[in-house]
Amino acid sequence: MFSVFRRTAVEVAESSLKALNMDGLQGWQKELPMVALKTEKDLQQWAIGSDKDIGGFSKANLDLTPEGTGRFHGNISLELPTNQEIKQSGYAAIRTIPKAQTLFGTPCWDTSLFRYLALHVKGDKRKYFVNIQTDGVVKTDLFQHRLFLRTPGEWETVMIPFKDFILTNNGMIQDDQIEMFRQKVKTVGISLMDRQEGPFDIEVDWIKAMNTEFTEGDMDRIPPKEEKA
């Protein structure tokens, strides 16, 4: 209980500092850094999962490269576990670990002032998905979007409009699509479930909420005119 009060005190202090700095009145912002994968401490903020958790045979690892970026890699197996109730296998995923609760709930990212979720990644030719979990009522809801890589094997920044994410639950697209609760983004992650056996390898540098100079949240923005000397 003491730790909950301490975390609450930290959150109150940070919120008060933001208020004193008038962060909410700064207007247009280019980006909101969310997570990075550069140190061993960063790795501790991520969870790894695969069909191995239900008796499958896929392997998934998350570690650091010598260059100081996160590497999500392993091998996908479609072999079914001995449990006959399991009808499908062959997936792997990583996601951020939700922050510890305070008396005000789970601290989340407020991405409402940004149009894109941006990822700096270097991947292979596998079909990855980006996953967003919000602090909503249904805990198994995930907003998903395909991670389209234009230059596999090279670093690139992929920018996905938040409005393009699709609501899913247990891997199934939901008939009743609802708007993402972007003020309360709880976790972000990457998954692989393309039903293809074999190795996979993708590196992650950082994930941010982002605007461009022409966007302000979901609104188009006209850059301010430069003052004449």
Image (tube, grey):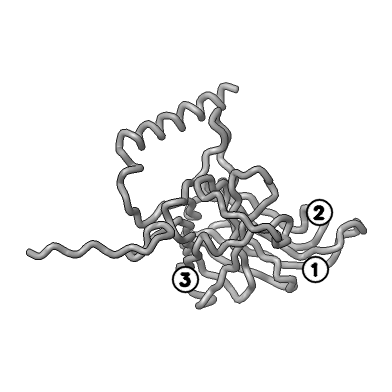
Question: Mark 1 packing: few (<14 Cα in 10 Å), some, or many (20+)?
Answer: some
For marks 2 and 1, give the CA distance. Answer: 13 Å
Could you say which is closer to the camera, residue 169 or residue 121? 169
Q: In the image, what residue occupies the spot 72% across and 73% down?
A: 198
Kindly identify the amino acid type of the residue bearing the numbered disc 3.
Answer: Trp
Q: Which residue is mark 1?
A: 78
Q: Tell me which numbered mark, 2 or 1, is placed earlier along the sequence.
A: 2
- The answer to whether residue 66 is visible is no
Tag shown at residue 90: none
Total of numbered circles in the picture?
3
- Report the quarter where the C terminus lies: bottom left
Q: Tell me which numbered mark, 2 or 3, is placed earlier along the sequence.
A: 2
Kindly identify the amino acid type of the residue bearing the numbered disc 1.
Answer: Leu
Q: Secondary structure at mark 1?
A: loop
Q: In the image, what residue occupies the spot 71% across and 55% down?
A: 169
Q: Which residue is mark 3?
A: 155
Kindly identify the amino acid type of the residue bearing the numbered disc 2.
Answer: Ile
Q: Quadrant of residue 71?
A: bottom right
Q: Position of residue 36 (x, y in %)?
A: 48, 54
Q: In the image, what residue occupies the spot 82% across and 64% down?
A: 88
Left or right: 17 with respect to 209?
Answer: left
Q: Do labels 2 and 1 touch, CB within 8 Å? A: no
Q: Which residue is mark 2?
A: 54
For marks 2 and 3, give the CA distance. Answer: 33 Å
Q: Quadrant of residue 124?
A: bottom right
For marks 1 and 3, give the CA distance. Answer: 29 Å
